[in-house]
C-alpha cells in the first residue's frame, strides 16, 4: 500500500471562476438547451425561465406517462425542474446533451416514485391493465414536438413486436424487465436483449446524432 | 445478474428497467467498463427522444411554483473544471525553467495554441483559460509546491485563485496496462481530472477548485477508472 503524501498548500482567496455572463432575453430565446443549461449553471434566472418553457412539456409528459396520476406528476415535475436548477453546475456535457440529461433525470424520478411502496398498488393495476401501447397526445403545441412524435411513432412501428413492447412497457409504463418478461411470458434474457437491440434499431431509425 | 452478461444490460438500464439492487450492481460495473458507459450514453440519448414524443403541457400554475421554488434554492458549487493540455506540445518547454511559474507562462501560450482549431464559441473560453493560467503563474500569492510521489518521481502544483496547474517529473514508467490518473478530492467526492499517461512528465490544469479540495494521483488499469481503484501515490491538500 503506497503512502499518501500530504502537503499543506494554502490557496489564496478564490474568486469564482465562472463569472456569470448575462445575456439579453432575445439571446436566450435563440439558445439551445445545452447553452441554456450552461447559463443556468451561472445562476442566470432569466435563462432558467426560457429553459422551463423549452422542456416543461416533455418533462411533464414523460412523468405523467409513467405516473398517470396528475397531482403526483406535477409534484415530480416540480422536483425535477428545481433539481435541474440546483445541479446545472454539475451537468457533464461529455456524457450527452442537456436534453438527455434532463429527461433521464425526469424518467428516473418518475420510476423511483412509481416503484416506491405507496405506489405498489397502482403498479399492480397497471400490470393488470397491460396498456402498453403508447397513446400520444393529439395536442402538441410545438411543431418540433409533432414532428418528433411522428418520427418516434414511425420508428416504433419498425421494431419487432417484442422489441416494441419491451421498450415501451419499460419506458412508458415503468415496468422492470422482470415484469416485462412476466407480462409477455418470455425469458428474462430475451427481454433484456430486445430492450437493447430495440433501442439500437430506434437509434438507427431516428438518427440520434443528427 | 452474472458478471459475464452485465454488459448486455445497457438497454434495460437505459429504460430504467432494472430494480434498485440490480441498478446499483450495474452502475458499479459501469465504473469499470468504458464501452458499457459509451453504449449507455448512446442509448439514453434515444430514450430522451421517447420522452419528447409524449410532451404534454403541465398546468400553467406550475411555472410560477417552480420559479418561486428556484428563487429560494441554492445551486451546488461548480464541479472542478478540468482541462488537459495538448500532449503533442514541444518538449523544450521542460528545459530547465527558472521557476515553475516561468514554465507555466509557456503552458499558457501553447495551451491557447492547442485550442486554435476549436470552434469560435470555444475560442473565447480558451483565451480566458490561457489568461487564467498566466494569472496563476504571475499571481504574487501563488503556491508552488513540489512533492514526492510515493512510487517515484515528483509532482509540482502551482495554484492561485481556484486554478491549479499540476505537472509531474520523472514518474516511474508503468507497464502498458497501467496509467496515472489525477483526481480532485472534494469531501467524499472523487472527480477524475483524467488519465495523464504512463510516466515521465505529465500535465493537467484544474479549474474551479475550492480551498478544501485536494488533488490526488493514483495508478489505474488501462483506460483509467471512473472512481479511484488504487491508493493515492500523491495528494496535495489546499488548506
Image: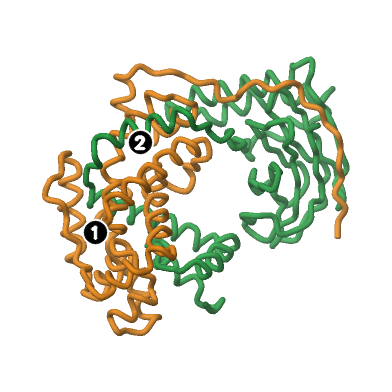
- Where does label 1 land, which residue? A205
Q: Residue at x 43, y 26 (%)?
A: B121
Q: Residue at x 28, y 80 (%)?
A: A184
* Mark 1 or mark 2: whose residue is earlier in sequence: 2
| The C terminus of chain B - image quarter | top right
Where residue A53 appears, as percent x and y from the top left, is 28, 33
Q: Chain of mark 2?
A: A
Badge 1 vs badge 2, beta-carbon distance below 8 Å = no
Q: Secondary structure at mark 2?
A: helix
- Where does label 2 land, which residue? A33
Query: Which hue belongs to chain B?
Result: green
Where residue B74 appears, as percent x and y from the top left, is 53, 31
Q: Is residue B6 left or right of residue B16?
A: right
Mark 2 burial class by Cα count in 10 Å: few <14, some 14-19, many 20+: many
Where residue B163 appears, as percent x and y from the top left, is 68, 28
**A8, above or below A66, in the image:** above
Q: Secondary structure at mark 1?
A: helix
Q: Which label is found at residue B41?
A: none
Amino acid at each position: 500500500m503506497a503512502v499518501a503524501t500530504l502537503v499543506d498548500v494554502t490557496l489564496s482567496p478564490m474568486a469564482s471562476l465562472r463569472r456569470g455572463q448575462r445575456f439579453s432575453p432575445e439571446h436566450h430565446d435563440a439558445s439551445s438547451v445545452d447553452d441554456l443549461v450552461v447559463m443556468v449553471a451561472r445562476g442566470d434566472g432569466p435563462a432558467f425561465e426560457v429553459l422551463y418553457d423549452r422542456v416543461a412539456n416533455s418533462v411533464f409528459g414523460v412523468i405523467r406517462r409513467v405516473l398517470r396520476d396528475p397531482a403526483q406528476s406535477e409534484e415530480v415535475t416540480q422536483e425535477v425542474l428545481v433539481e435541474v436548477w440546483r445541479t446545472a453546475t454539475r451537468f457533464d456535457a461529455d456524457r450527452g446533451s442537456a436534453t438527455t440529461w434532463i429527461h433521464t433525470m425526469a424518467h428516473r424520478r418518475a420510476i423511483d416514485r412509481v416503484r416506491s411502496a405507496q405506489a405498489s398498488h397502482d403498479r399492480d393495476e397497471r400490470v393488470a391493465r397491460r396498456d402498453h401501447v403508447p397513446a400520444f397526445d393529439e395536442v402538441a403545441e410545438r411543431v418540433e414536438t409533432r414532428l418528433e412524435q411522428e418520427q418516434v411513432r414511425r420508428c416504433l412501428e419498425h421494431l419487432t413486436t417484442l422489441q416494441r413492447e419491451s421498450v415501451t412497457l419499460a419506458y412508458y409504463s415503468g415496468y422492470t424487465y422482470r415484469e416485462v418478461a412476466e407480462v409477455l411470458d418470455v425469458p428474462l434474457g430475451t427481454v433484456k436483449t430486445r430492450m437493447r437491440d430495440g433501442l439500437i434499431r430506434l437509434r438507427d431509425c431516428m438518427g440520434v446524432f443528427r | 445478474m452474472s458478471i459475464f452478461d452485465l454488459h448486455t444490460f445497457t438497454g434495460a438500464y437505459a429504460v430504467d428497467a432494472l430494480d434498485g439492487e440490480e441498478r446499483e450492481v450495474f452502475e458499479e460495473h459501469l465504473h469499470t467498463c468504458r464501452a458499457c458507459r459509451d453504449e449507455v450514453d448512446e442509448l439514453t440519448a434515444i430514450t430522451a427522444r421517447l420522452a419528447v414524443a409524449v410532451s404534454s403541457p403541465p398546468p400553467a400554475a406550475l411555472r410560477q411554483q417552480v420559479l418561486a421554488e428556484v428563487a429560494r434554492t441554492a445551486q451546488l458549487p461548480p464541479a472542478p473544471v478540468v482541462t488537459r493540455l495538448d500532449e503533442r506540445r514541444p518538449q523544450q518547454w521542460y528545459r530547465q525553467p527558472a521557476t515553475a511559474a516561468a514554465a507555466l507562462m509557456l503552458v499558457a501560450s501553447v495551451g491557447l495554441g492547442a485550442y486554435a482549431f476549436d470552434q469560435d464559441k470555444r475560442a473565447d473560453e480558451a483565451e480566458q483559460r490561457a489568461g487564467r493560467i498566466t494569472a496563476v503563474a504571475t499571481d504574487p500569492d501563488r503556491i508552488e509546491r513540489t512533492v514526492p510521489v510515493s512510487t517515484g518521481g515528483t509532482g509540482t502544483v502551482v495554484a492561485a485563485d481556484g486554478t491549479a496547474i499540476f505537472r509531474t517529473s520523472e514518474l516511474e514508467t508503468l507497464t502498458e496496462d497501467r496509467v496515472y490518473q489525477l483526481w480532485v478530492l472534494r469531501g467524499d467526492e472523487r472527480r477524475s481530472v483524467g488519465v495523464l499517461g504512463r510516466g515521465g512528465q505529465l500535465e493537467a490544469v484544474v479549474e474551479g477548485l475550492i480551498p478544501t479540495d485536494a488533488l490526488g494521483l493514483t495508478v489505474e488499469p488501462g483506460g483509467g477508472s471512473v472512481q479511484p481503484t488504487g491508493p493515492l501515490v500523491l495528494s496535495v491538500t489546499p488548506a
